[in-house]
Amino acid sequence: MPKNISRNRSAVISSESLSLDLYRKLYMTRRAEEFIIEYYHEDDMKTPMHMSMGEEAIAVGVCHALGLDNQIWTSYRTHAAFLAKTEDTEQFFGELYGKVTGVSAGKAGSMHLADPSKGYMAASAVVASILPSAVGMAFANKSNATGHISCVFFGDGALDEGVFWESLNLACVMDLPVLFVCEDNRLSVHTPTHIRQGYNSITDVVSRFSCTVIQESTTDVERIHTITKEAMNTIHTTRKPVFLHLECYRYLEHVGINEDFDAGYRSKEEYEQWYEWDCVKLQRERLTNQGFSSADLRKVESVIDNQLLTSIRKAQAAPFPQPEELYRGVFYEAD
Amino acid sequence: MDTSEVVFETEWFNVERQRHDGIKALQNKPYYRINASDGVIVLAMTLDNQIILVDQFRPALGCRTLEIPAGAIDPYESPEEAAARELYEETGYICENITPLKNGQLMASRLNARLFSFLAVGAVLDSSYVSKEDIKVLLVSPFELKEYILSNQFGQYAAIALLVLADWESDLSLTRPEVS
């Protein structure tokens, strides 16, 4: 359960534009996945879907704070991170439909969405395998004095892999500007934490390394945005990595577009407790408290709905890539 | 959906035969769906709050109808662009204040197209406009439109839903108009 969300209306101090910008991204991400659910049965999107639904506040809060210049790396659960970082719904749906208009010309699918031109460097389907790349990017950032932060998103299941600890160790020992973001839903596919990990607290163990550890259990996108900004300042001032440990809850099955409360590894009641603090609802409520009318918000939402549906229609109409596209972009190509 | 196959195709729509053996009512028999372009419908009002209607011949009904502007969205066009285009093509009016309302289904039992609705306030006639279609433009007050609807002279049901949406999302009072 999220613990530290304030419903005290007078506690809202964020600027309206920030609140609205964050809401737009949250709403876009949620609606994009709702449209995926609506259209997936047509079987035109051939890619397996690892849905972000329920966990969007982390991707949106962190990516909005990072902006375009700082880099991100993620696991296969890419949807929220991609839309939060790029806001490019046409390349998003183009990729899901496997068309040339996709961000990777239709070759990557849902699990490998990325756009290096906007700082989304890569996504990997192999658990924890993206961490060394993120650390390598941070080494390049430090060597070239770019001032950029390399941010890597991973689930709590990544901590069960040796490469996580090697990456954390190297980032700490080499003082690299890495923001580690652990999206902890307490599940590795269907396996809960207590039968996977021989320690009680992730943050206790990670805090023994030479880095700053920040822990939150919240679905409040503005809180996540704020602590990300704090983490970025800490990286710049201490020149050490920061480890953000953020609890969250995945609404849908590990892979696929359906609920799976009948699978026996978690309960519907747990979902309902988290849904009370749903990040999209919470941010909409904040905007209402700031004076936005329902009509104002519905106009914002209608514009995004139309944008998403236009992107879907364009993706459906776009051509598939030609065979010669297959090997393009696989290896580095000099200009 | 177990299987699907396009069995009839035209420039404007196709008919798809599907099997849904998992749905009890459809076991062992085909289901036919019409795939068509999404569309827009525009409730446009002039600066003096007159609603812009179009009078045109509808071959499907074999008669002329009174409607508000509407039409299909082109493949690489946004609903907003289509709304402005259809309004101009059918009426010659230009509007800088076109607000998206909701979108929804027209005939969920058979058709998968969406209809996107818009409210256009303060539309102005382009004096250089020349109509390319056999369409007459009428300007009516909200009260006159209500009379048309209640006397069966206006049967575009999507437009009636749009009147409700426009009332909910603006300070207009289109569903309970005063006598003009």
Image (spheres, coloured by chain):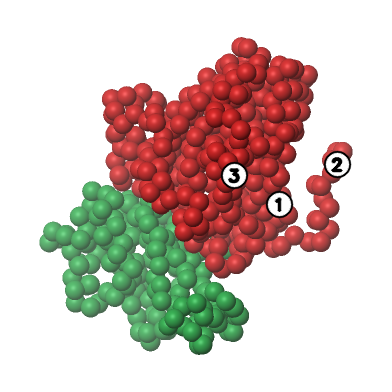
Chain colours: A red, B green
Residue sitting at 47 percent across and 50 percent down? A266
Residue contact at pointers 2 and 3, CB within 8 angstroms: no
Q: Amino acid at mark 2?
A: Glu
Determine which residue is flagged by label 3. A188
Q: Is residue A39 left or right of residue B116?
A: right
Q: Is residue B143 left or right of residue B3?
A: left
In this figure, which residue is indicated by the disc labeled 1? Answer: A108
Q: What residue sits 66% from the left and 24% below the top?
A: A178
Instruction: State the residue in front, B96 or A280.
Output: A280
Q: Nearer the viewer, mark 2 or mark 3?
A: 3
SS type, badge 3: strand
User: Do discs 1 and 3 belong to a common subunit?
Assistant: yes
Tell me which numbered mark, 1 or 3, is placed earlier along the sequence.
1
User: SS of the residue at dot 1?
Assistant: loop
Residue A137 figure quarter: top right
The residue indicated by pointer 2 is: A333
Count of marks overlaid on the render: 3
- Residue A270: percent from the left, percent from the top? 41, 46
Mark 1 and mark 2: Cα distance apart in space: 18 Å
Left or right side of A25 for A73: right
- Counting residues from the N terminus, which is met first, the one under dot 1 or under dot 2? 1
Q: Position of residue B103 (x, y in %)?
A: 40, 60
Q: Earlier in the sequence, mark 2 or mark 3?
A: 3
